[in-house]
Image (cartoon, helix red, strand yellow):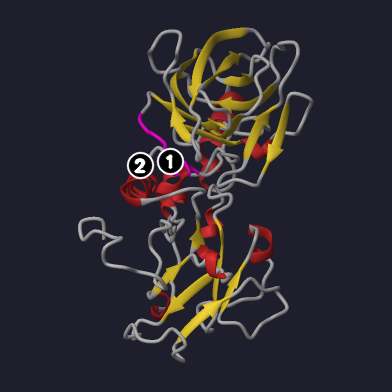
Amino acid sequence: MRVAILFRLFCFIIPTIFWSCNRPPVADFYDADGIVSIHTDSAYSNASWATDSSGVAFALVSEPLEERKIGETSFSFFIREPGSYAFWLFGNTNTEKSQPLQLRFLDEQDETISIHRIELLPEEVPHWVNQDQLTEEPVVLVVEDAGFYKVQLESGGAGGLQVSKLHFSKDGSVIPFGAGYPETTDWRMEPEVNKRLQQSRIPPSWVFGVISNQNRYTTDGLLLDHYYSGGNLTFADTKIGRLVTDELKSEDFRFYTDFTSLENSDSEPSNSRSLDLYPAQNLLDSTHKNLPLPWYRPVESSGFEALRKSIHFLSNPDLVTYESSWLLILPDWYDPLNQEENEISEELM
């Protein structure tokens, strides 16, 4: 009896000093403050799904299959607190039409708990979705006991389905937005606090000039200083940047073709006169906020449609671009070198 009492006291006092006696077993992901957040880059490529890091968000992309397979790829996590966990998936499809993705929730014995189907939209950037096509209700995982659980993704043999993140929330109390919450790889973390700490670095004042895409004139960008009066473009305070290599350190403007080359550069934009731009890639990685001006260039854009798309990308919390602090989407009709009053209406400007 005394031994039992001492053990209980030990388990009550020690957590405040060292570790909790309720420490869960080792797992890939945990529920932390009622949230399970999973980034699909933790999965490995296989015959059914391939990894792709070339878009605005890292994604697992389904391969076309001749035969449908069950449990093509899966993610395991540990839940300590039973209850109902609302589920959201962050994805899209590179096909012309919407495509269904089947989900299967499994328990610790790999027994199927429930099966759901989510529709992925044919959009340029991934969306947060949580409606079950089968029931037209939100997707929910019912957890009866603490333990390991698994979510399986099944493409049904269709190729081009892209999945970037998975999010569970107890009682649906925390709805994901933008790039979602940090991965819950530690059961002691506070996902909402960690997300709030992912602050953006503010660029120096000289950045806030006019930057535009100048592809038709062979230049990759144009930086006009904030005190530029709009005169001759050869004025000394106007800098035209060209696509250059990392070795050329004397340029005022450098354009990187991928995230890796920018990340590995030795540029210090906060205390130098250079401006670095790159195509928006992997906005799920919060470190992009520490780098200057991710630049998204739409394939085609014109007039009010370009304006509508820009507003949509920057104001819709279901999109990854919602949290891109320095995202620039300049339509092709905005051209400082060739602006005629009759081409651009006052309403459009």
From what the image shows, is residue 342 above or below residue 33?
A: below
Q: How crowded is mark 1: few (under 14 residues within 10 Å), some or many (20 or more)?
A: many
> Alpha carbon of mark 1 to alpha carbon of mark 2: how far?
6 Å
Q: Kindly identify which residue carries mark 2.
A: 316
Which residue corresponds to the image point at 68% horizontal and 33% vertical from the top-left? 26
On the question of residue 2 being in view, the answer is no
Kind of residue indicated by mark 2: Asn
Q: Is mark 1 on a helix, strand or loop?
A: loop
Residue 301 pos. (x, y %): 43, 49
Element under disc 2: loop
Residue carrying label 1: 319
The span shown in magenta is 173-181
Q: Which residue corresponds to the image point at 40% horizontal and 82% vertical from the top-left? A: 225
Q: In this view, does 157 lie to the left or right of 282?
A: right
Q: Which mark is residue 175?
A: none
**Location of residue 11 (image quadrant):** top right
Residue furthest out toward the right: 47
Q: In this view, does 278 lie to the left or right of 345?
A: right
Above-or-below relation of 6 to 106: below
Are circles 1 and 2 on residues that touch, CB within 8 Å? yes
Report the residue at 56% width, 51% height from top. 285
Q: Is residue 198 magenta?
A: no
Relative image position of residue 321 (x, y in whole percent): 44, 48
User: The disc labelled 1 sits on which kind of residue?
Assistant: Leu
Residue sitting at x 35%, y 45%: 305
